[in-house]
Amino acid sequence: MVQTYQVPELAIFPETARIDDRGHLTVGGCDVSSLAMEYGTPLYIFDEATLRNRCSEYRREFCSRYPSVQVLYASKAYLNRALAVLFEEEGLGLDVVSGGEFGIARSVGFPASRVHFHGNNKSAGEIDQAVAAGIGRIIIDNFHELGLVEASASKAGKVQEVMLRLSPGVDAHTHGHTTTGIVDSKFGFPIVTGQAEEALRKALASSHLDLIGLHTHLGSPIYEMEPYQEAIGIVLEFAARMRDRHGFEIREFSPGGGFAIQYTVDKPAPCTGEYAEVISGAIKEGCQHHGLPLPRLVIEPGRSIVGRAGVALYSVGATKDIPSVRKYVSLDGGMADNIRPAIYGSRYEALVANKALAKKEERVTLAGKYCESGDILIKDIDLPPLSPMDIVAIPASGAYCLSMASNYNASLRPPILLLKEGKARLIRRRETVEDLTRCDVV
């Protein structure tokens, strides 16, 4: 019988993560170091059990507290064809923000009726394709888009179901680059300026738009509950005023997503049940106060479904030790596959996958390989002594790392494996130089 060992960092890794008696990190029953040797690094792995468990957890926690719920996966966190199939199997819909994301969904036959289309500058072509495909909802973000969607539906001879994205003027206390619910935001119709009411009036007057609900999104990641309560109260008060002034009936309501995950040992995130309790309770309370029927609740988790499920694997290369200053250990990836530390100041943990039980005797800075001084994955972390070809595993890497990846320095985006019960399935191969030059015209 193989003994397993626990370390604090495992709380951030996928649910199936273990450390075996050799001191090796395993995920989904697979030895992570062996996968790195077989497929090369950088390498991203996803644990299928964690993905499916998170999907079912959102359905269970919200549906047990609220009568009608639709869970949409926020595709911008990361989507590829294999994951789209998995989410469809788990009964989720999709929140997409581009024709490309919608195209990935369509390529595997994902039901268009379970897709909602977001974004602050959808093109006429994207809207036409969505309407023609029978997309479930278009979330209208501005007056320009209101006209485009109406024209597209008219041309197609359809009545398109839409929601209005509102800006409630609530600060979610997250990073400035990911705060979206304040008045000074590129997203949504502000309520306080009267523009939200004007948009609602125009949508109700259109014979080709069916305004079924209201949407708001405060940003991400949100660790506090109060912003959700405040925003829900503001939007439902607006809905009640619009009922009284214009006869508007709110049939669907979405407070968006933004649910946080744990990135470091010292900063846990609220559990799904906490979000479900606060959001469900705030909607029930607001509807009762204003005499509104309970609308269908639409939630949009993204990071909190794929974040913990994903792990980034790197090989150790060069070391630069500056006495009394800092010791840099360079990895073979960096800002091209994970730009979050560079643009958000995001903090991660790490384990040495082939030395997971070794004593942490050195403080090092894990540097990327790209030609930017800001290409630092983790600054000042305590790890065991590192040697070339050791495998460094960075958890909580499933969200936004891959979707924001680039070919900076003509790098090749990494392969991705889906792990389950001791087996690894390749769901995206490593790019090649031929891929880099395929679109070039000489």
Image: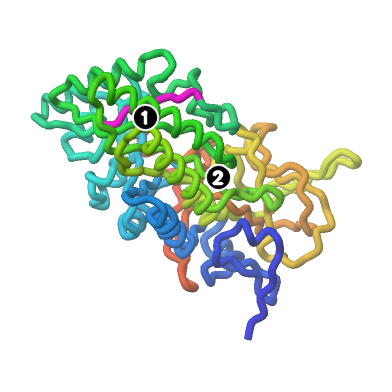
Residue at 23 percent across and 27 percent down: it is 125
Q: Is 348 placed left or right of 398 in the picture?
A: right
Residue on which disc 1 sits: 119
Considering every residue shown, the one lying at the far right of the view is 324
On screen, residue 96 above or below 390 = above
Residue on which disc 2 sits: 260
Q: Residues within 10 Å of mark 2 (few under 14, many from 20)?
A: many
Considering every residue shown, the one lying at the far top of the view is 193
Residue at 24 percent across and 24 percent down: it is 124
Q: Is residue 117 magenta?
A: no
Colour mode of the rendering: rainbow
Looking at the rendered structure, the secondary structure element under dot 2 is loop
Q: Nearer the viewer, residue 397 or 441?
A: 397
Where does residue 174 sit, x and y in percent of width and height? 59, 33
Q: Main secondary structure of the magenta part?
A: strand
Q: For the magenta stretch, what is the residue range?
A: 162-169
| Nearest to viewer (mark 1 / mark 2) | 2
Res. 282 visible in picture: yes
Where does residue 206 sit, x and y in percent of width and height? 17, 21
Where does residue 189 sit, x and y in percent of width and height? 38, 21
